[in-house]
Image (spheres, helix red, strand yellow):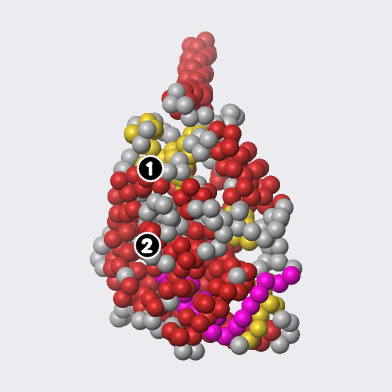
Amino acid sequence: MGHFMEGIGKAVWTGALLVLLALVAKLWRSIVTRFWLEPRSLDARIRSQGIEGPPRTFMAGNMLQVMKMRDTGKERDMEGLNHDIVKHVLLDYHQWSKEYGKRYCYWWATEPRIMVTEPELIREVLAKKVTQFEKSDIMVSELVSIVGRGLVAVTGDEWSYHRRVVAPAFYLEKLKKMVPRIGLCALEMLDRWEEALREQPEIEMSSEFSKLTADIISHTAFGSSYLKGQKAFETLRAIQEELSKVNRYNYIPGKRFLPFPANFRLRKLYSDLDSLLLGLIKERRAQSGQSHDLLGLMLAECGNSSFDDRAVMEECKTFYFAGHETTAILLTWSIMLLALHPEWQERARAEAQEVCEGATPEADSISKLKLINMILHETLRLYPPVGVMMRSCFEDTILGDILVPKGAAVSFPILAIHHDKELWGEDAHEFNPERFKDGVTKASKHPNAFMPFSLGPRVCVGQSFVLMEAKIALATILQHFRFRLSPSYRHCPVFKLTLRPRHSLPLVMEKI
């Protein structure tokens, strides 16, 4: 009997060992396929079309090289105060496009990305072949960690559904109702400046605009619940700071499950943010009547649909990032450019005084701020919030003269396209708002060369809101203050989620 049981035990152990070996072999085969065989096949298909690029490393591709080159720009200020910033901010594109041509291939982990700069091909991807080109799982994962699983991050049918619910909140007639509140937030900021200027002649603008846009989005998104909205904003900012610490490890599969201290802090912050927003949404659903803030408008649009509280919560996260971050950065660069170009500052001031007559802009007068609109567009051209955009290819697709294989991606260097002399002329690196006097489609040699908010059906749904905020803030500031750059200003644009000054933006302010 003992020998019999011993034989059974050996058979069980042998079977378990065989199962374990089979699992290890399957795992090994999966690793070899994902990290070696599939990339090698894609590499051969891309290179066979004459598209070259830097040599890649196992697993990481060129990711660490890209990060290192972009960190180089963060470590040193620009020589002189000019707007020729591509070689400073996108050193990888600057070097590799010189070596391999504007169309080259680099690797983000195991995903090859073909750099495309022709506006016509970009329009084809973003407007005509949207089912073939989508955000990859890598891109979606990165976006969700930053802005939640809202309209910016979702794809396919999920995106269509989110768009139907969210877009009506940004219709012009609904945005107009938010104009008085935005104006009040701007005036409160100016009151704060007057107090500060009694002690010293300079104001640091990047932090001021961050406070302003956080105040605006807290009021316009959450209305009477804006104090809780501000708490949510503070938590989201803390999340973004922690994410910047772990982004260096993006090439490691499952990095968010690894025992990094930042990962532990992130889990706590995500939990706190979700609890805060879900509580706020439940409170609002329990109230009678409709509010005219973004949350109220979105809940009204949801009705009895399957767009549940968690989906609304994810869109609230997107509101915060897109509505706050983009506008704050746009205002920061705009006021820097106006401080650097006093002739344009005076022209914009004269327009604001004529249109607004000393008050904040009214809903029906914002469209009359044409010079300020041109200035904002030129700012978005020189300093777009997003420097590079990507789309992954989900089936073999002809794009112009390229066959983009399934599993590859196309990458659009928005910043470089906005600075391309072939598209914008010899003054491409110079501040010249006049180029937009006849609108964005006639500002360059191609109607789609200007794309700070993307193109096609997925163009940013909140772009009108961003521009409205910026126009109201600038018109209000210009009527009350003159300003110039402080001698202590150091010019160093860097990408940290968005394109922003590495250092502060101090201005010498003079009350009018």
* Front one among 442 and 289: 442
Q: Tell me the distance, in whole angstroms, between the alpha carbons under discs 1 and 2.
A: 22 Å
Q: Which residues are magenta?
A: 465-487
* Front residue of 358 and 139: 358
Tell me the crowding category of disc 1: few under 14, some 14 to 19, or many 20 or more residues within 10 angstroms, Cα based: some
Circle on res. 461: 2
Q: Which mark is residue 121?
A: 1
Indicate yes or no whether the magenta region holds residue 471.
yes
- Between 163 and 437, the one lying in front of the other is 437
Q: Is residue 416 magenta?
A: no
Task: Say whether disc 1 or disc 2 marks the residue closer to the N-terminus.
Answer: 1
Q: Nearer the viewer, residue 99 or 186?
A: 99
**Image point 52% across, 29% down: which residue?**
52
Where residue 75 sits in the image (x, y, percent)?
71, 51
Callout 2 environment at 10 Å: few (<14), some (14 to 19), or many (20+)?
many
The reply, left or right, for residue 131 in relation to residue 181 is left
Indicate whether 403 appears above or below 415.
above
Question: Is any atom of residue 98 visible in this view?
Answer: yes
Q: Nearer the viewer, mark 1 or mark 2?
A: 1
Residue at the front extreme, as displayed: 426
Q: Residue visible at 48% across and 36% down?
A: 103
